[in-house]
Image: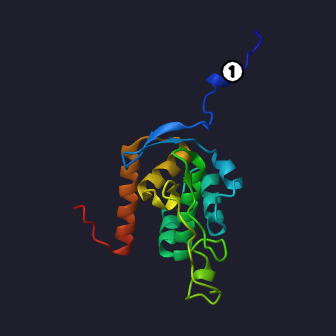
Amino acid sequence: MGKSVATPASQWKGKVDVEGTPLDLPSENTALVRQIDPTAFLSSGLIPDPLRPMVQTAINSKQGLRPRDTKKMMDDPKLLGAAMELMDRTICYVIVEPEIVMPPTCTECGEYANVEKHSRQSSKFEHRYSEGKRDPEVLYADQVDLLDKQFVFQYAMTGTMELQPFREELDAVVGDLQAQQGVPDKAK
């Protein structure tokens, strides 16, 4: 038997692109986006606590979030807020260009609006949320279109760059949610 030679790093198949790849987004913008290994995602600190068990199951199963988990998030304001924060933190981490940053936090406590201390309906209410000053030259995560966030999230986790399958899958999920909630489909 001949001596084996290791595959050079430049030819390694399946490696995660951390330098960034131009990605055409649903909004017709283009961003330079890097991928993240799904298992590294768990230890990155990007996942808000309320979502950790759900996301961990999705990553370990390698099948993504189950439709019932998506519905659970849509029905629970706390989970929905955590999901939006997850998307925002993820795009800040994976989009190399343009630089995207998290929005300013509360000037009083340094936290975001979705915590109980800012909710008048909560027994833990402390004070009204007062967002810090924004720089008009900065692109903040909450200014990025939701479809772009979802598409970037999918790409960063799976490497899928195709817009058409993304749109079809999104339509299927939205249709399922509308059917479950008795919402008429306006597209028909």
Residue 124 position (above or below residue 152): below
Seen from this angle, which residue lies furthest left?
188
Q: Position of residue 137 (x, y in %)?
A: 50, 54
Rendered residue at 35%/56% (across/down): 171
Rendered residue at 67%/49% (across/down): 39
Quadrant in which residue 19 is drawn? top right
Tell me if 14 is positioned left or right of 145 in this view.
Answer: right
Seen from this angle, which residue lies furthest top?
2
Which residue position is annotated with label 1? 7
Residue type, numbered disc 1: Thr
- Colouring method of the image: rainbow
Q: Position of residue 99 (x, y in %)?
A: 55, 48
In the rendered image, the quadrant that contains the N terminus is top right
Q: Position of residue 164 (x, y in %)?
A: 36, 44
Q: Secondary structure at mark 1?
A: loop
In the rendered image, the quadrant that contains the C terminus is bottom left
Rendered residue at 53%/41% (across/down): 159
Between residues 106 and 179, which one lies in front from this camera angle? 106
Residue 127 position (above or below residue 181): below
Rendered residue at 55%/63% (across/down): 103
